[in-house]
Amino acid sequence: MIAVVAATVHNGLGWNLADDMRQLFELHFMVNAFRAGTIVAVVAGAMGWFTVLRRQSFAGHALAVVSFPGAAGAVWLGVSATAGTFVASISAALVIALVPRSASGGGEDSAVIGTVQALALASGVLFVSLYGGFLNSLNGLLFGTFLGITDDQVTTLIIVGAAVLLVLAAIGRPLFFATIDADVAQASGVPVRLLSVVFLVLLGCAAAEVSQITGSLLVFALLVLPAASAQRLTSRPGSSFVLTIVLALAITWVALAAAYFSVYPIGFFVTTIGLGVFVVVTVAQSAKVRIQRRGRSGFTSQGMAA
Amino acid sequence: MFSSMFSSMFSTANPVAGIVHMFGHSFLRRAFLAGTAISLASGLVGYFVVLRRQVFTGEALSHVAFTGALGALAVGAELRVGLYGSCIVFGLLMAALGSRGRADDAVVGSVFAWVLGLGALFLTIYTRSSSASDGTAGVRVLFGSIFGLSRGQTTASVVVSIGVATLILAISRPLLFASIDEAVAGSSGVPVRLLGFGFLGVVGVTAAVATQAVGALLLLGLLAAPAGAAQRLTSRPFTAMWLAAGIAVGSMWAGLSLSYAAPKVPPSFGIVAVASACYLVAIAITTGRRAASFGTPGHDHSDDRPHAHSHSH
């Protein structure tokens, strides 16, 4: 289907792989898209690995949703949308980190989160409406775009991405400890609370970076799916960390190429490929577990819990 | 800039004349008519959604509503067929899965992200394929189009919303019992499973009708914010239920008026902003009350259950 549609767009996708690659990197905007995508994928993979481990995927989603009014507000005020994205996401991360969590959880907490998200999205619409360019930027901000990424944006992404990775490298070991067993870590002098605040700020940066490619609403696909897939494939921390980044890179590159050769939005490809990888991994894992158990003890197992 | 934004409503010094002028527009009469019915239904349903801790289902429905509506457009069907169809089917599906199907967060979130990605695909297919398509379809589904309702759409919204509100009121007593203590309700003969199933179907219908008012993405602003505020303010169930409905209707009226007075402000922003502000005020009031009754703010986590605080006062 892709090949059929692509013919209308460009020279089209052919059987000559070298020619396809040449087409892909022919235009400067596409080179920038791959640069940005690569940076974003590495940051998303590294941060996503910890995010899934710490079960904070919905915090990541919320921070990404907030990046939408940030970008729209920045466009309205005439400043850089990328800067607006980062400011909004990092401020939201600080708010989430510093507001005390209620002990009961449940219905009311999710009502608060749901309301905040709806308000953030509504503010984004307000800014877009005040700016006046209602249609052009909106779908890109929400569902991702790989068109028109400037050199400046790539530079910003590199600087923020490098900073995130450096801080993550510095706190990685205690953070892992605090994630696996917060009580023991606390007892042995690890500043658990401080680490979680720093981690949320990093997550804000990462969510803002990822939303440059996937759009505000689809950050989950690149932040969570590679890590969730990798952690199912192997339980060794080092290998699953590397595997997460590899998967994130592969998903991003394939999605970029697919979006280039077709007319469909990149958000669709990122989410579909990401979920596809996850489904294949889950099915393969549960089949493997089932075969192993059957071979060992003879009784039919329930398979892996989803 | 702000003063120019508010010019249209207050061009006359007399506020009564301003309001009369406002209702001179047929699009605004329709918006108020449909909006009142929709927000009444959303407030009532939303109260039980929050009480039953199903806000997450509401969030999921907002994704499904978007994709369903645009999927219908992409294959050339009527938008509302896809909207209602997808929301009701999904609501019932969630009910059927129930607690057995409670997968972990990452999986659920990823599936919902994919649903939205699919919606983005349908949006592209729709805007590219039919020459007669209007480019605003995606925005209308995402963020509502209450000022653009036709006469037929208004009638349909009012009929559906009143139906939902009536149904909820009819089953409110057993539903409340089942929501607060499922085990006891079940053992005293309340059809707990049937209620849970039917309720999520009703939530689906509400999501579909509310999508036309505030849009798929802002659904929770109308479903969760009034209910959350009401539950904060009172612990008496029926008072809270009516309060949620009242806050929802009030937010609708205030939001529509705000958007009329300041044309650059989209109506869905006005509605969601007012509803969120109500929630914020409710949190501020109850937090202050709680701090006053306890003296030491450090103890407040012992009193964080949503139903406990007004007893302490």
Image (cartoon, rainbow, N blue to C red):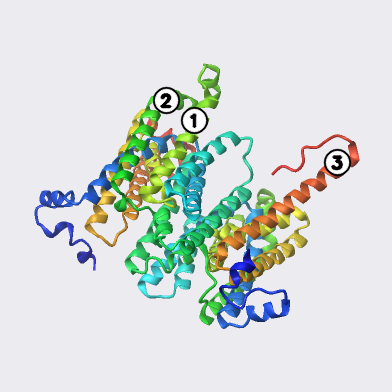
Q: Is residue B92 above or below residue A37?
A: above
Give the residue at mark 2.
B171
Asked which secondary structure carries label 2, the reply is: loop
Comparing labels 1 and 2, the label whose residue is closer to the camera: 1
Q: How many marks?
A: 3
Mark 2 neighbour class, 10 Å CA radius: few under 14, some 14 to 19, many 20 or more = few
* Residue type, numbered disc 1: Gly
Q: Residue at the spot x=72%, y=76% of the render?
A: A17
- Name the residue nearer the viewer: A54 or A274: A274
Q: Is residue A27 above or below residue B159?
A: below
- Name the residue nearer the viewer: A259 or A172: A259
* Residue type, numbered disc 3: Arg
- Name the residue nearer the viewer: A244 or A29: A29
Give the Cα distance between marks 2 and 3.
Answer: 48 Å
- Name the residue nearer the viewer: A264 or A241: A264
* Residue type, numbered disc 2: Ile
Q: Residue at the spot x=40%, y=70% of the render?
A: A74
Comparing labels 3 and 1, the label whose residue is closer to the camera: 1
Q: Indicate the quadrant where residue A157 lies.
A: bottom right
Give the residue at mark 1.
B198
Asked which secondary structure carries label 1, the reply is: helix
Asked whether the residues under marks 1 and 2 belong to the same chain, the reply is: yes
Asked which secondary structure carries label 3, the reply is: helix
Give the residue at mark 3.
A293
Left or right placement of residue A230 versus residue A27 in this view = right
Where does residue A12 sit, x and y in percent of width and height?
62, 75
Give the Cα distance between marks 3 and 1.
Answer: 40 Å
Which chain hosts label 1?
B
